[in-house]
Amino acid sequence: MPKVVFFLIAAGFVILGSWLLAGIPGHFSASIGSYSIDTSAPIAIVMSIVLVAAILIVLRVAGSIAAIPRSGAAWRRRSRRAAGETAITRVLVALAAGEQGPAWKEARRARLLLGDSPQTLLLVAEAARLAGREDEAGEAFQVLAKHPGARFLGLRGLLRQAVDRRDWPGALIVAREAEAAHPGTAWLRQQRADLAIQTGNWADAVEFIGPDARRLTYCVAAADAEPDPGRSIGFAKQAWKQDPTFPPAVIAYASRLRARGHERRAQACIAAAWKRAPHPDLAVFALAPQTTPLARHQAGKRLAGINPSHPESRILMARVSLDAGFTGEARHQIEIAEAEGVKQQRRLCLLLAEIEEHDRGDTEAGRIAQRDALRRAASADPDPHWQCTNCRIDHALWLPKCETCGEVGTIQWQTGARTPGLAIIAA
Ligand SMILES: [Zn+2]
């Protein structure tokens, strides 16, 4: 209905225009050479309009013909881009599905169609890695690393490849370049921490690691590895503050205090740890400055007195008493320990054998008592010891990294039985 109304209005205007045009008076004449035109004014106006319209149409057609080559190239570009984007979609689908062959094939096709854009390079590299073509992936990552806006993506890929190859020096170089290209990323920080651990650079591990249960281990290891005494005691103090009962951390800090002449502060650290969690290594450190059995007995008595009912205090008192010749006291401490429910450990049986030897000497009764104690030692529970919780190998001393399986922070104090058939790794 609106179209009909519009048509009627337009027709009315055309009729009105024609009527007005026909009413224009006058005469038009022109001559060019031997040609001449002689007509009325309305006809001349209509002819002029037709002529202008014809010229415009001719110009439009000529322009379209001239633009045919350009529009053909644009069409081909649009076609290639559409095909390239389709290939990219197929690569993404294939990567998500873990389809190595199709992913690699479509990625190469996308690169051919779209050129070396960051997107195509990254897809080619990832698809090549999935297909096991590390050389091709490396080439794509190298080119990607030269793109100003995508340099970090290329370096990230090269870093992952270096880590997979266990090329630690190469990985460290790439990690530093990646840090310069895009500083402060959490992922890169974790990578640098892992690299520091792999290369035994404990100071860097402490710097880069975030909240991590193994940070304590790194601090102790960094203190031992750091040649500068000031930095070394700084790492040791960090470890001690993190866990003032962990014997390696306590001894790391106390030993550096002792080296600086702060013996009382060193002994205070040991005493505080002994109060909460006695450990044989703490006693060894605390008694080290004492050179005579009597002095060691006195020092042992002071330390054991901090936590007198703990089995380690009983065993310490038995040891220093026996060394000082107080066999009655030594026997008494062992009997109390056993009465208080301490499991029959090998070290207790061996201490009893020593006491029997000291008390009864080379007599028939003494030999029988020693044999009995040694027989009990053979079948007794093993002594508490350091053990890797990953590979279950026993260690004579605590180490930050297990020398057998290479895991970091897995050596822990165990009070259970040793794993049958496994050796002890001597430090
Ligand atoms: Zn291990």
Image (cartoon, grey):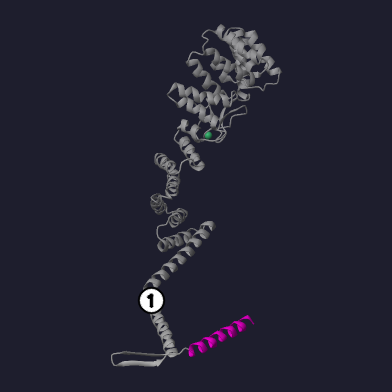
Q: Nearest the camera: 347 or 307?
A: 307
| Location of residue 76 with respect to 25 vertically, above or below | above
Which contiguous range is marked in magenta?
Answer: 1-23
Looking at the rendered image, the quarter that the N terminus falls into is bottom right
The residue drawn where x is 44% and y is 35% is 199
- Give percent across and percent down for residue 112: 40, 62
Is residue 307 rendered to the left or right of residue 200? right
Residue 271 in the image: state x and y as whole percent.
60, 16
Q: Vertically, is 170 above or below 226?
A: below
User: Which residue extends farthest front?
Assistant: 25
* Amino acid at dot 1: Gly
Q: In terms of depth relative to the viewer, which is nearer, 340 or 29?
A: 29
SS of the residue at dot 1? helix
The answer to whether the residue bearing label 1 lies less than 8 angstroms from the nearest atom of ligand 1 is no
Name the residue nearer the viewer: 358 or 101: 101
Question: Residue 359: x, y in percent?
Answer: 61, 8
How many numbered circles does the render carry? 1
Location of residue 47 with respect to 411 vertically, above or below: below
Give the residue displayed 59% in from the left and 13% down from the top: 319
Q: Nearer the viewer, residue 23 or 110?
A: 23
Examine the rendered structure and indicate whether residue 374 appears above or below residue 142. above
- Look at 56% across and 6% down and name the residue there: 294
> What residue is disc 1 on?
63
Res. 425 in view: no
Q: Is the magenta stretch mostly helix, strand or loop?
A: helix
Asked whether 10 falls inside the magenta stretch, the response is: yes
State the image quarter where residue 422 is shown: top right
Near mark 1 (Cα within 10 A), the count class, few <14, some 14-19 or many ≥20, is: few
Task: Residue 234 in the image: state x and y as whole percent.
Answer: 50, 24
Going by the picture, which residue comes out furthest to the left? 33
Using the rendered view, name the quadrant where residue 325 is placed.
Answer: top right
